[in-house]
Image (cartoon, coloured by chain):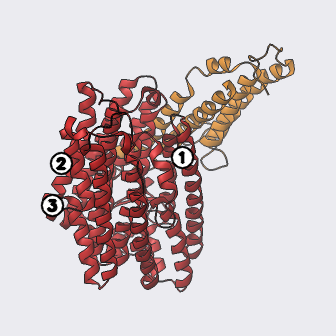
Amino acid sequence: MGLLLLLPLLIPFVTAALALLTWRRRRIQRALALAGSIGLLVSALVLLLVVWRGGIQVVQVGNWPAPFGITFVADLFSAIMTVLGGIIAVAVVIFSHASVDSRRERFGYYPLLLFLMMGISGSFLTGDIFNLYVWFEVMLMSSFVLVALGNERAQLEGALKYVTINLVSSAIFLTAVGVLYSVSGTLNMAQLSVQLSQSRQPELITVVAMLFLIAFGIKAALFPLFFWLPASYPVAPVAITALFAGLLTKVGVYALIRVFTLLFTQDIGFTHALLLLIGALTMVTGVLGAAAQNEFRRILSTHIISQIGYMVMGLALFTPLALAGAIFFLIHNIIVKANLFLVSGAVYQLQGSFHLKKLGGLYRSHVGLSLLFLISAMSLAGLPPLSGFWAKFLLIRASLEVNQPVIAFVALGVSLLTLFSMTKIWAEVFWKNRPETAPAPKPLSTSVRLQLLLPVAGLSCLIVGIGLLAEPIFILSSQAASQLLSPAEYVTAVLGGTP
Amino acid sequence: MKPAEKDNTIPSLILLTATRYLVPVLLLFSLFLLTRGHNEPGGGFVGGLVAGAAFALYGIAHTVHDARRLLRFPPRVLIGIGLLVAVGSGLFSLFYRRPFMTGIWSVVEVPVIGKVGTPGIFDIGVFITVLGMVLQIVFELMEE
């Protein structure tokens, strides 16, 4: 049983190491990347099933008992996130086969991708706060290179901003971990949860909580720390942007949810009220920023920010329904966001541009792709019966239940503006006639078309599926939420009967 | 210091002679560090750094090309092998139905080294990875 929990880490790790050995063999590298990501997805699915049936799973690495060794824990929330990581990894790898140029492939694109996936899975599954920092670093190291790989001028500029802000964030994170250790004398999250709830210095802990909020807030692109995201995401190759957009900011959200449910619940009146305010501001600024953009990927990138606001809103309301809504929203958003970026990449392959002005007429020439975009876009905006509708419905209902009509109103307004941005892309890229200056869509070979369309179609099916099968997904997320809201279960699973 | 192949200056005789003696010493010292690492200062990481320094020194005294030939494997292959060795040492404990990375020790003691076990194999993996990593960077920079 123990190995299963670690497979989502070991599979990408081993395949990445093998990919290093087969550096110049492009086909083997591609096959390894595909095998690694599928292995990750399958192991994550099995893990989710096991956690669903048998409760929280724990592994003490090296057989050192809990507060001393490094613990890996999979509760439902972790397992769900790992599965999502696997889904996006598979889609991105297939899409990369058709869209990433051979120069990048030669310089270690696939091993880096696999190391990145290992870092992401590690962040989801670790039960140790310092170990979380380590996984963040693993993830960031690979992502730094992936952003900069290719050496284009705009890319280096974006990469510089990305690296700088992330190093600042890591430094704050590390400081926060240090302070937390000096206050509580432990790094194991389960034991921290016990220690902090009995602490006699709640003010100090709130200060540490704010440090964590800043550190994770930068990674998750919260208001007012989001400025780096629109500058750095759109410059990398689309497959990479899709992976980052789908997963990297969400790792920040995951960490926020984890620490603000397990560790910092002493002063909910202050911390979670602040989170609610930040969530609202993140939603509004993000969506307004997106309305001002005129480039496919920039619109989508800026929208990431506003969507993060919804998740933080669910965390901030801190009721079972709201947290379930936040998790549902995460499931929905990771898939939709990645898919929208993949569509933008497919459009780029066809017409060679991301600028709305230079695009057009795709509905006439590529009906299938247009419809796939429409599904994701309408889901993002929250139209029933797609996945986004249910996610937003849950969150808004949760906010009304606790008498927070203002945030409900904000969420609805932001949805409307999202719809505006999505229709703008629809009208410009797909609906309007092709501008005369724009080249005709390039004919693509069948294998390339398949590799571009397969992931997009697969993710679109998932989006529709989540919409139609909202109930099982809701039950899953509310179970995950109830686990999050009762840390005792997590603590007992990690530390055994005697916390 | 410029690598010797860029300009046609004669490589320093002192450096060449010193390298001849220093490289074996450094490599032996790196192995010494590797083997004493479990309970005393040392280990795979520093060992790998020292071994990397030996090859880098050879590269400076002769040429990067020579150093690469001395190493035999491309550095990034070493990184891959090292990672696999390290993870393999962790998987070993699964045969004994213990969690990943549990240290499994030999019953009999090996002369000079003492007890051997999977943490040692892990350290060897780290050693190879660090050696590969250092040389990947150093060779790349020296060829610029």
Work out which residue is located at the far right of the displayed protein and give it: B14
Residue at which label 3 appears? A385
Which chain wears orange? Answer: B
Q: Earlier in the sequence, mark 3 or mark 1?
A: 1
Query: What kind of element bears circle 1?
Result: helix
**Where's residue A401, x and y in %?**
25, 83
Same chain under badges 2 and 3? The reply is yes
Q: Nearer the viewer, mark 2 or mark 3?
A: 3
Give the amino acid at mark 2. Answer: Cys
Q: Residue at x 63, y 35 (%)?
A: B134
Can residue A1 be seen here? The reply is no
Give the amino acid at mark 3. Answer: Pro
Q: Is residue B2 left or right of residue A6?
A: right
**Where's residue A63, x and y in %?**
42, 56
**Closer-to-camera residue (B21/A50):** A50
Task: For mark 1, name the chain.
Answer: A
Residue at which label 2 appears? A461
